Image (cartoon, rainbow, N blue to C red):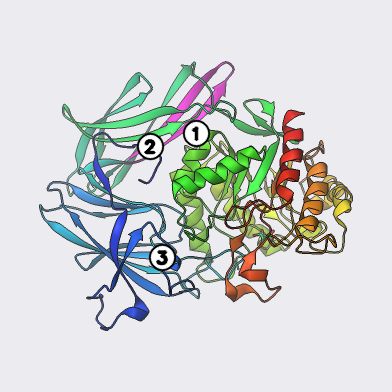
Amino acid sequence: MLRTFNQHDIRNTFSLDGWWDFVTEKDRKQSRVFPGRFPRQAYIPCAWEIIPGLESYRGRAWFRTRVPGEPGTAMRLAFGGVSHTGRVFVDRKEIGSHYDAFTPWDVLTPECEDREYELLVEVDNTFGEHSALHIGNDYYTYGGITRPVDVQYVPEVYVDRMTAVPRRKGKTWDLEVRIVLKNWSEKRLTRLVRFLLNDQELDLGRVTVSAGKEREISTRLTGLTVREWSVENPHLHEITALLFDRDLAVDDLTDRVGFREVKVRGSKILFNGKPVRLRGYNRHEDHPHYGCAIPVESMVRDLNMISDLGCNFVRTCHYPNDQRFLDLCDEMGFFVWEESHARHVDFSHPAYRKQIEDSTREMITRHFNHPSIIIWGTLNECEAQTASGRKEHARVLSLMRKLDDSRPVTFADNTMEKNQCAGLVDIISWNIYTGWYGDMRPDQAEDRLKEMLAWLKSSKSKGGKGKPVIISEFGAGAIYGNRNPSRVRWTEEYQAEILDHALKTYLNHPAVSGAAIWQFADCRVTEENQWWFPRPRTYNNKGTVDEYRRPKLCYEIVKKRMKEARDR
Ligand code: ADA
């Protein structure tokens, strides 16, 4: 399933997760366009790197299954994520493709017949001129159909998506709702639309959608007295859009909302009107048993550990996450900073502009309703120190605000005093590695913070003054099991020392609204980008736990400092 809850009672859907035929390009014998033989199978969702012999395979591969058609409907294939490019063929006819592993997408086969269809997906995880966001990086780009796949049978006019914005009005709430209908037929059709919130049902009237087009309708519920969402009490409300053709209910879409509001006021981040302090982690979607295709049970394990560590916050570095992870954050009560897919990307790459726009638009459009998401981020450690870089940051940040005016936006910066973009964001976010990078000692975390706060207050920050500050990354590397009283680099002792100084500084400083440790678990990196300093084991070893989630020495220190801050 694409989500942790059922989204359709009327629409006929089922999961395509499970065994698919599988062949890599290098295993293919024939040179015909489509593979004829599939020597093995893969269990979807899967990263092919978990298949012995393919641990480091970077190339193309094909997946095949069969899906039955349902007469009078269109077959909508909904992918949670394919890494990193998928091309979909139904009966050997290409019906769509998508770049970027980290956002959901779908393709449609109209006018289904009562028979079986062959579904082929060509997957590509190569780097090059075609890929600006998936590049050699300090995380690994896996290959495969790495998130769940559903097949859905949709009528001529169906509900494509729905967004709901809660607006706090004193003691009551308004809910701004937008519903987008799509018409795949060649006829102009009219349907009756109804909207449900809990037991309240609203008739939104008759809506006409032109052939092959989409149509947005909106409504606003006012004066609602509802249970709010918070990390302590993560109460969720179901919302449903219903479509009727005359008296017959023909389609539906259910999602969930949490009544909460996040705003920036002066140097504070306000959550439901009160200042909030974020304490938590950067977390990659990475595990040696699954690659990036992490099963929901393993996500729960990670979040249980992050909660055990006394944290309330997760940054989905550096890309949109699997929606089931976001559902869990909604259900368990975590604040989330979700970001569009970019780390150290090259703004001059020919494919960059379209790909970052698509990643940002798809992330916000499809992940809009998660109450846990309180911050949208983008462009991690990109070119923020030049005039052209500032223009690009302004472009992406304004796209985010256009898509959603209800959440603050930011980017994690490491250009520090050279940053030209502090005036563009709602929240200032710094990646600071005192004691690990540069020549400052671990006990100089406060000195370095003071330097940066002084810069922020000065005119040199070009409009950054007075904004909330999050320390979006800090930490150090340690190889699990490497214990040595010498406390040299890569020992667990040195990592713990750096984290202890950093946490005592960042969790208690009145000018800091949030702190996210880099990082929760060790993660695999790509061999291709080891030029500037080789990562031991070809892993980023800054996890508080290693890749198997085995706690390092710093675990108990982090837990102590986080809980002190929580209970203050
Ligand atoms: C940067 C970057 C992270 C990671 C980190 C590190 O801050 O944002 O993705 O590479 O450095 O481990 O050095």
Kindly tell me whether mark 3's CB lies below 8 Å from ligand 1.
Answer: no
Please identify the quarter of the rendering in which residue 336 is found.
top right
Residue drawn at 87 percent across, 64 percent down: 439
Q: Is-magenta flag for residue 168?
A: yes
Q: Which residue range is magenta in the image? A: 160-180
Image height of 264 relative to 499, above or below:
above
Residue 5's mark?
2
Local secondary structure at mark 3: strand
Local secondary structure at mark 2: loop
Can residue 375 be seen here? The reply is no
CA–CA distance between discs 1 and 3? 31 Å
Q: Mark 3: which amino acid?
A: Thr
Q: Please tell me which residue lies in front, 75 or 517.
A: 517
The residue that label 1 is drawn on is 331
Q: Position of residue 566 (x, y in %)?
A: 72, 32
Tell me which label, 2 or 1, sits earlier in the chain: 2
Residue drawn at 22 percent across, 51 percent down: 75
Q: Position of residue 152 (x, y in %)?
A: 26, 47
In this rendering, would 452 be left or right of 103?
A: right
Q: Mark 2: which amino acid?
A: Phe
Q: Say few, some or many: other residues with alpha carbon within 10 Å of mark 1 (under 14 / 14 to 19 / 20 or more).
A: many
Residue 85's mark?
3
Tell me which label, 1 or 3, sits earlier in the chain: 3
CA–CA distance between discs 2 and 1? 11 Å
Q: Quadrant of the C terminus?
A: top right
For the residues carrying marks 2 and 3, which lies nearer the camera in this image?
2
Q: Quadrant of the N terminus?
A: top left
